[in-house]
Image: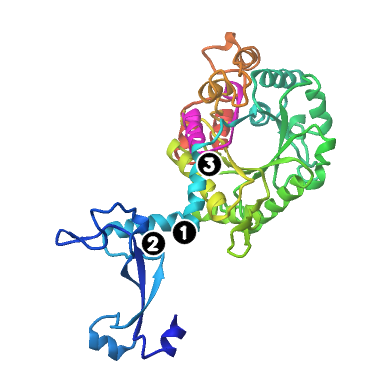
Amino acid sequence: MIRIFRNEPDKYDSVASVQNNKNFFWMNNKPLNFDPKAQCKSQNLPPVLNATYAACIIERDNMMNVRNCVGERPLLYEVDELEAIDIDTSLDFLISESLHKLSINTLDDVTTNLQYLDTVTSRQKPLLLDCTIRDGGYTNNWNFSDEFVMKAYEAVSESGMDYFEIGFRSNTDLFPPHSKMGRFAYVTDDIVHKVKVCVPSGCKMAVMAKMGTFTADDFCNATDSPVDMVRVLFPLLDEDRRSKFSGKKFAECVQACRDIKAKGYTVCLNLACAEVLTMADYEAICDMVVYSKHKSFGPNGNASVPGSACCDFLYLADTYGAVDADLASRLVKKLRFELTVRQRCVDCSIGFHAHNNLGDGWTKTLSAIDAGASIVDSCIFGLGRGAGNVQSEVLICHTHGMAGGNGKMLDLEPLLHFGDSNIQSYEHLPFQSRFSFGQNCLHLMTGFLKMHPDYAQTILNNY
């Protein structure tokens, strides 16, 4: 446009951006661009161009002469309705800020956002993961008997849940065992196989692996393992062991997830301390999770390859129990937006793991599900560190009723029977069970103050 303007000075004295309006216009109560007696669609109206002032080029002397930034013989440069937005009123500012937050820079971005909204409204019921043994192990240092774990696996499988997390996969060189730690802090494939064969048609098996306590070599190919899912825990510690996000350490976590996923496992990347991470942290995390970026090709960029993620599920872990229902919803939506809209990634869903410090575990879990979480965690009778977790038996009542998302029935009875017999026996009521967990004023305060539950547990154990 500038070249044309410069090369044809006799024809054009300025350049101005305009928008093509095909609307019905009146002036002085008379139609301007249509015949009211003739039927006409707005798409077929003769265009009326209005100056947007998005870009104007004119020589200074000419502008002073015409007292306008558009001359008498302008070269008109047409822009679309998005580029034509002129920010004058408060409503204009609000519209522009909203578009910016949605990363809408072109009309193609509008289409992408509509596709994102379609995925929100058409979501399925979430996958359910029971972590009674793994999270419940914090109450007894994972010193469960084989019989206890087998019965728990049987109950979870019979209830219709999707995954059973049996414990931690830890490398004994990186995380040396000591007398207090039970075998389910160091789960091997042999242990998983022994439990899994007790229920041949049981649900899928998961293990957690905490960064710094394992290597990818601790996992064989998934086809040779009874483990279906590996959940990689990323603790919120920087190089100086402060509770801050470290891009360098997270890059190591991303690589570990890629290595494990390459072996055929379903991989979760669990972000500890979700309530402490900032929105800028989440943007950096999603950018790093999607290691292979979206690519467009074709004559008009109308074909594309979506971005690829290092994990199948990116998890928010409510480590301190301080996430409330509103924050749970906002964080899930933030991650889904970053992955789906900004990164154009379609192979990574969001998970949520809630703690019950403030008595709102299932409330915020349902809020996360409503926001689009595809998988959520729970424990039988809420057995877990500190104030405990969402109760599996309560969660499935709220999420599935009696019919599972895949058509199978979800049954409360196995969970209730196991919990009554093994976690909270009737003879111990109304006191807390023989496991050291449950709500009390100290755990409530740790959740309110965003403190680690171990502070409260130390006081309860020693005073």
Helix, strand or loop at mark 1: helix
Three-letter code, disc 2: Glu
Q: Which mark is residue 107?
A: 1
Is 280 colored magenta in this rendering? no
Mark 2 and mark 3 in contact (Cβ < 8 Å)? no
| Position of the C terminus by quadrant | top right
Q: Is residue 276 visible?
A: no
Three-letter code, disc 1: Leu
Using the numbered discs, state the Cα–Cα distance from disc 3 to disc 2 in whole angstroms.
26 Å
Structural crowding at the residue carrying mark 3, measured as other residues with C-alpha within 10 Å and reported as few (<14), some (14–19) or many (≥20): some
Left or right of residue 252: residue 69: left
Place of residue 314 in the rendered image (x, y in percent of width and height, measured from the top left): 61, 44
Mark 2 and mark 1 in contact (Cβ < 8 Å)? yes
Quarter-of-image position of residue 292: bottom right
Q: Which mark is residue 54?
A: none
Give the magenta range.
Answer: 360-385
Q: Nearer the viewer, mark 3 or mark 2?
A: 2
Task: Name the outermost residue toward the front.
Answer: 38
Q: Which mark is residue 81?
A: 2
Q: Which residue is mark 3?
A: 119
Vertical arrangement, residue 160 with respect to residue 420, above or below: below
Three-letter code, disc 3: Thr
| Image point (40%, 61%), residue name | 82
Structural crowding at the residue carrying mark 2, measured as other residues with C-alpha within 10 Å and reported as few (<14), some (14–19) or many (≥20): some
Quarter-of-image position of residue 137: top right
Observer-nearest of 357 and 366: 366
Q: Is residue 234 visible?
A: yes
Whichever of callouts 1 and 2 sits on the residue coming sooner in the sequence is: 2
